[in-house]
Amino acid sequence: MTGGTIPFTAVDESADLLERRGEPNLILLELRLAGRLDADRLRAAVGDALRALPMARARRASGGPWRRRSSWEIPGGPDLDPLTVAPAGAVPDTERRRMMDTPVPLSTSPTLRLRLLPSPGTPGPGADASGTGGHAADGGDRLLIAAHHALFDAISCLGFLTSVSHAYNGTQDPVAVPDETRTPESPAAPDAAHAPHAELFPRAVRVARAAAPGDGGYGCVLTEFDADRTAALAAAARRRAATVNDLLITALALTVTRWNAAHRRPSTPVRITMPINARAADRRFDGIRNHSRLTSISSAAGEPAELLASVADQTRRAKRTAAPAGGPAAQVLGSPALPRGLRRTLVGPVRAAARLLADTTMLSNLGRLPDPPAFDGAGNTTGLWLAAPAPMPRGLSVSALTVFGRLHLAVRHRYAVLGAPAAAAFTAAFTEALDELAALPASSHLSAHATEGRSQ
């Protein structure tokens, strides 16, 4: 499809307007392989995927400040080659940071960038090409994708990568590409009794800072649980009539509370943003658009078991409630009632309000994913991570997904909040809190009704 325009949603508008210099609004996806990718073959596959997915090559159409909505336009082809190749042996941490800190303009197609990190070595002894997910040594290539959050959410990034893998392998995508060239319908108004952000006070705490002076930009700490450790979390969730997502949110709340107490900063209340995938159940992993719906989960001081029960109750209610698209900022900055030029003047006040009212942090969990993208001749996929944006004033986000029975975690942080050693320490404290929750005994109040419909 080419020609015509597709209006921005309120989420698209706010994601565009709130982006500021030095803080690109990008999602990062990282794939680790046991073997090596052929750069030319990969470049051709990226081009094929862009041709097959019209919205993946969308760009913001030009327009004056008095337009009610910005619009996407879909050119016949991309404006540039989005794939670059790092020198052999490039340091992943350095490349990851460069990807997160380099803006991706919405006016240029496509609004994503890919970076291939060739390995200087050979696949480790555990590598094979069977695609069964055996955990190989970290000797293979890595592929990084940074996509602008105005158009892409995490599911979109994963879907695009999957299409690239099919093109690389010379196979067809197993399902038809959904029509994303229509503006998604606005969700129903949320139930006031359970509306996210309905209780704006007391003010949520901020993560206690432990940063080196003058350091800026983004960092990201990646870690993963082996199959046994991941299975222990799932078993604990079942014992407590909860989900793994509930355990992740609870562990993050505990970590922030303990971290702040150790740094002599206010430690409660903690409020955690939880994105909800608004796609229909039969196309949960499909589509190139930002379908984020945001809700907030609150926690105060309490024992781990008590806190987990509260979180599980809140997430159950949140999933039954129509969350506003993109949160309160999108309702203001995405409203078509005012021209874009006037809405831009509201960015400053919205940011000022965010400094007072924004949640402490965010937990984004994609849950259990189908088999991750596989690339012929490159051995097993040995790791897959998502890193959601972490703009100030939060300055910290935790992202999770499970593939091949292993939980993959990314702690993304602004260096203004946590320096590299502090981010590593925070990540260690978070994984320890998860292990603590995994050891909880069964709830004495477990019931069939409480466990009905619970999943990751």
Image: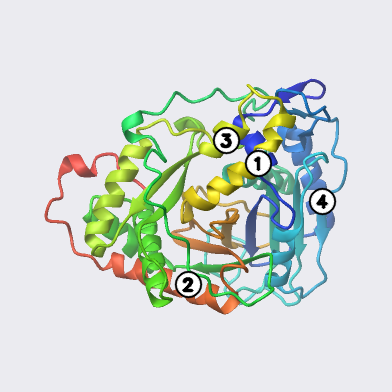
Q: For the residue labelled by badge 3, is the local secondary structure a helix, a strand or a loop?
A: helix
Q: Residue at x 31, y 32 (%)?
A: 193
Q: Position of residue 347 (x, y in %)?
A: 65, 41
Q: Quadrant of residue 314?
A: top left
Task: Compute the Cα span from label 1 to label 2.
Answer: 31 Å
Q: Position of residue 389 (x, y in %)?
A: 60, 53
Q: Quadrant of residue 17?
A: top right
Mark 4: amino acid = Arg
* Labels 1, 4: front one: 1
Q: Are marks 1 and 2 in contact (CB under 8 Å)?
A: no
Task: Say which label, 3 or 4, has the lower sequence index.
Answer: 4
Mark 2: amino acid = Phe
Q: Nearer the viewer, residue 60 or 127?
A: 60
Task: Compute the Cα span from label 4 to label 2.
Answer: 37 Å
Q: Which residue is mark 1?
A: 347
Task: Say which label, 2 or 3, has the lower sequence index.
Answer: 3
Q: Nearer the viewer, residue 75 or 286?
A: 75
Q: Is residue 86 above or below residue 448?
A: below
Q: Which residue is mark 3?
A: 330
Q: For the residue labelled by badge 1, is the local secondary structure a helix, a strand or a loop?
A: helix
Q: Position of residue 280 (x, y in %)?
A: 48, 30
Mark 3: amino acid = Ala
